[in-house]
Image (cartoon, rainbow, N blue to C red):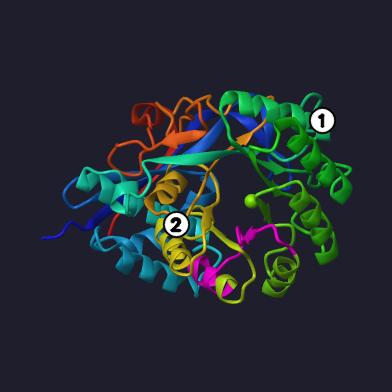
Amino acid sequence: MTARIDSFEVRVFETETRSTRDHHGHRHPGPLAAAHEALVTVRDSEGAEGHVLTPVRNVREDAFADPLLRGLVGRPVMSVEQVMRDVVMAQRGNPVDIADRRIAVVDELLWDLIGVRAGAPVWRLLGGAQERVRAYASTMCGDEIEGGLATPEDYARFARQLVEQGYRAIKLHTWFPPVAFAPSVKRDIEACAAVREAVGPDVDLMLDGYHWYNRQEALTIGRAIEELGFRWFEEPMEEVSITAYRWLSDQLDIPVIGPETASGRNLSRGDWAHFGAVDILRIGPQNGGGITSSMKALHMAESLGMTCEIHGNGAASLAVVAATYASQFYERGLLHPHSDYDWLPPHLSGQVDPLDDDGGVTLHERPGIGQQIDLDHIRRHTVRAYEVTA
Ligand code: MG
């Protein structure tokens, strides 16, 4: 008998954070503060478990338990294609509750369980291409914090620190509203120039700036960072117009990369590749429909002679980057002069992505996705929980 999904358990627990979010959702450094997070557990008919951590908003019972989880009880654990097809088909009739980020939680849960059952890390089960991956330092967005990321000189100083820490590649996120002076084409270019000057020609640099520039503004920035030898130009315009991105990619020599936030999972990536909208594809497990969808985009990119870079940090992103040769970097961040990325919240017992002194991350050999979760801490600090069975 094949193992089948038996039940799900959702726990909201108290932990600690050192970051805050502005009202556009951008993270900035903050004081040590109490926070809530959620753990979702899947159990199979043989007692094996998979776990995924996710923001509390993703596990609201009325939007998660019945619309998504309950229908999966009884499904074969190893048939992830079969289960995920049912989930994405159900999205059509209930796109609000069955959002891509909730789909991703289910998909990552299944992969974690499959890895645990196999006694193997998921990145190896998915192909196991790269035992060590190159990482880039991905900065937080610009701000107005003293000694933070408020000026081009701040970015330059921070970039020098990052190179001293071992990074060999850096991606700048520049200024967004609600920062008063954002957006600014001129200031974005000045920050890029200051960082290139600070780190010299041998460090790979990328820009991810304001996402609502028009074509001409994007072209101006793209030409400037082309001159500065940047490696890619990310999401300068809204990701709803393939035509606008195709126009931009046609004008620039520097590779344009995307889409990061477009809906449609791997299917939309197919169109972006087919219509020549970008030079480098992009998807991520968290908002691109999970590991399964990201793997389809990676294999498609490789088959077309393209690369595909993975959005976001964490265990699932790292697994997907390492699985094939189509990704060239792991995104390590977000980083800020006033924030310690290597600080562990109390519900984690270890880090999934320790940086080595030459800008790389060596993959772990733990069964499953590989996140080191302190389940005892979570049980002791649970504030509410629910279970989903048949
Ligand atoms: Mg981005």
Q: Is residue 199 above or below residue 259?
A: above
**Residue stretch in magenta:** 252-271
The quadrant of the rendering that contains the N terminus is bottom left
Q: In screen coordinates, is 254 left or right of 321?
A: right
Numbered disc in front, either 1 or 2: 1
Task: State yes or no: residue 206 in magenta.
Answer: no
* Residue type beneath disc 2: Gly
Q: Are marks 1 and 2 in contact (CB under 8 Å)?
A: no
Q: Is residue 292 above or below residue 17?
A: below
The part of the image, by quadrant, that contains residue 278 is bottom right
Would you say residue 213 is visible in this rendering? no
Q: Secondary structure at mark 1?
A: helix
Q: Position of residue 271 (x, y in %)?
A: 56, 75
Q: Secondary structure at mark 2?
A: helix
Circle number at residue 290 = 2
Q: Position of residue 235 (x, y in %)?
A: 69, 57
Q: Nearest the camera: 201 or 149?
A: 201
The part of the image, by quadrant, that contains residue 222 is bottom right
Q: Position of residue 274 (x, y in %)?
A: 56, 76
Q: Nearest the camera: 323 or 44?
A: 323
* Residue type beneath disc 1: Glu
Would you say residue 236 is visible in this rendering? yes
Disc 1 target residue: 153
Q: Nearest the camera: 326 or 180?
A: 326
The quadrant of the rendering that contains the C terminus is bottom left
